[in-house]
Structure formats: structure tokens, C-alpha cells
Image (tube, helix red, strand yellow):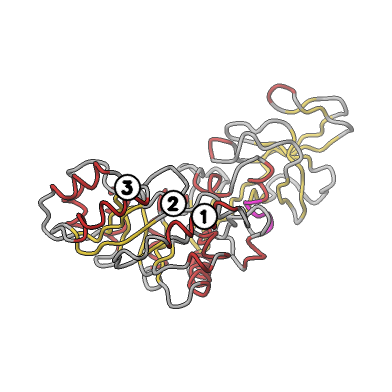
Amino acid sequence: MRPLLATIDLAAIQHNYALAQRCAPGRQAFAVVKANAYGHGVREVVGALLELADGFAVASVEEAVVVRELHTSTRILLLEGCFEAAEYALAAQLGLDVAVHTAEQADALLAADLQQPLRVWLKLDSGMHRLGFSPAEVRAWHPRLRGAAQVAELNLLSHFACADERGHPLTEEQVEVFLDLLDLDFDQRSLANSAALLTIPAAHMDWQRPGIMLYGATPFADLSAEELGLRPAMSLTAQVIAVHEVAAGQSVGYGASWMAPRDSRIATVSCGYADGYPRQAPEGTSVWVAGQRAPLVGRVSMDMLTVDISAVPEAQLGSAVELWGAQLPVDELAQACGTIGYELLSKVTARVPRRYRQF
């Protein structure tokens, strides 16, 4: 078997959900498990949180079906709502909470013949301008939906654009836009994502939506997961599969882009961009091998990458290599690559085996 493994610590995910609960005591939370639980495995993550989570949030009916197979009664929020009219009947059959963010969705809901009414989350565009109704449109749709036979519960939902940038003025504006609508009769309200849950108490409504924090990564550029009390859930580990002595002036990898500045000892590692390691990782990016950091050299290949282990004499053929995890936070790699931990975790490909550590 190719020596590459994503080890998922389910106890860490439980710890991180419990931290989310402590941030907003007395409130409820949808654990966000869309995109295969951010690459961690939706079935396993939902299984770990079944006795803890108040509900789960997904991006599509297909994802909701998987969660419902695991739990017959938990609340499941369909964050983007139904993509076609026929999905409302399935949503009712599955007992979903459904977001409604366009007039077309609202009209299709009101025209639907459902076996049971739905818990509806009216999506407010409070300033992100991606999905949702304007405040005026929310006020116009509220009375039409409040008394509809298809609606069991009418709730209000919105999403932050810049909560991950602490002190950004748009965040306060979005909170104010949301609060200005609370003179309307809504059953439940939800505003806080991970960043707001951790740092913006004014955004703690009836339901929180922790996402990236569940998986032990930070939503902030200036606060680490460790500083926030989060535990990393995924460790991506590979192995040294070859060691070469490279003379000064010789190149390594595609494009001969890296030239050895001195006689160097180079390790080839069994992970590449087809596994989800970012191809854009710059030279000097750290990996963890034989208890030390070692720098990436040359270009990341489809199946392999190369590391300068000249300063790590203990590293040898067969040595374990951590690409991210307990020793190297995924956020550190993400920052080096100009991206975010969300992307790296969710892009770990299906060919990487997952191994689960139980609680």
C-alpha cells in the first residue's frame, strides 16, 4: 500500500464542538458537515457527534440524505435550500430545515404539495451579497411565508463576509442589519459562523453554525487554532520513499527550478498534488520528519514532493513525514500557499485512505 494516510481524531472533533457550545452557553448549534465534513468523512464525523450535536448543516439534498441515514430525527439544515421544485417534497420526507434565499425558491415552496410542513430559514443578505433577500424583501416575504401551509416554522438566517477579519467594519454593519429585522416574528435565528461564534457574542443567536473550528483549524489569520483552544482533527502523513545525494549546482524536480546551493541530501516523499497537497507550496515550506522541520525544495509533483534533509541526519528511507497535523498546523501551510485551511482539508482526495481514531 502506498504510504500516505489521513488520520482523523474523532475525539478532537468532539472537543471542538464542546468548545463551540461553551462559547455560546444555552444556545444550539448546527455542526457544519458539508463537503464530506470538510474532507474528514461525513459518516464518521456525524457518528462522532450524534450524541452531542443539536443538528447538522449541509449544502445539498444528497448530503442531507447521508446524514438522515445515520440519524432519523436530528435537525438537518439545507444551507443553500432546494435547487429545483421537486426537491421540496424530498426535503419534507426527510424532515429537513430548508433555507430560502430567492423569490423563485419561495414561490416553489408555496406551490409545493408536501406531506408535512417544513422548518424554513429565510436567508437575509445582510451585506455579503452572495445569497439572500434584502431587508425590504425579507419584510415583504415574511407575512406570505408565516401563514403558509408549507411552513411549520419560520426562521431568519444570514452569513458574515468578514467575521474572520477581527474588527472589520462590515461585520458590525451586518449584525445591525440582522438585529433591525427582529421586530418581525421569527421562531429561530442564526447568524454566527465559527469566527463569530469565537469572537462576536452579539452574533450568538438561537442557533450557531460552527464549521472550520470543528476540524481544529482557525478562521483567523492572526489567531492560531492552539490559541483558540482547538485541537487539530486531521494529520496527513507520508513516508520518505527515496534519498539522494545531490551535488552543489544540481537541480531537483520538474523545471529544474531548485538548484542545490551546496551538497545536499534530498528525500522524496509519497505525497503530491493529486492527494491534495498544494502544488503552489513554495520552496522552504516546512514538513515534519524525524522530529524536525525540513524545507520543501523543487516543485510539488502529482504523486511526490521533495525535501532537503541535509540538516536532519536522523531522516532516512522509510521515515514518517507529517505534511500537516499535530506538529505542523494546516493553517501554517495554508498561509504559506496563500490559501486557507478550509481548502486544504476539503481537497484531500479520495485516494488518500482515512484512518479514524476513536474517542
Instruction: Bin the neighbour count of mark 3 within 10 Å (Cα to Cα): few under 14, some 14-19, many 20 and up.
Output: many
In the image, is residue 84 above or below residue 15? above
From the top left corner, tell me how far across and down residue 101 is, in percent. Answer: 32, 47
Indicate which disc residue 173 carries. Answer: 1
The amino acid type, in three-letter code, at marker 3 is His
Residue 217, image quadrant = bottom right
Left-right relation of 265 to 78: right
Instruction: Give, as a single range, the part of the protein colored magenta.
Output: 327-331
Measured in 3D between alpha carbons, the distance from the residue under mark 3 to the one under mark 2, in whole angstroms, is 12 Å
In this rendering, the label closer to the viewer, 3 or 2: 2
In the image, is residue 264 above or below residue 18? above
Q: Give the mark nearest the N terminus, 3 or 1.
A: 3
Q: Are marks 1 and 2 in contact (CB under 8 Å)?
A: yes
Front-most of residues 61 and 157: 157
Indicate which disc residue 101 carries. Answer: 3
Q: Pointer 2: what residue?
A: 126
The amino acid type, in three-letter code, at marker 1 is Glu
Residue 215 part of the magenta-drawn span: no
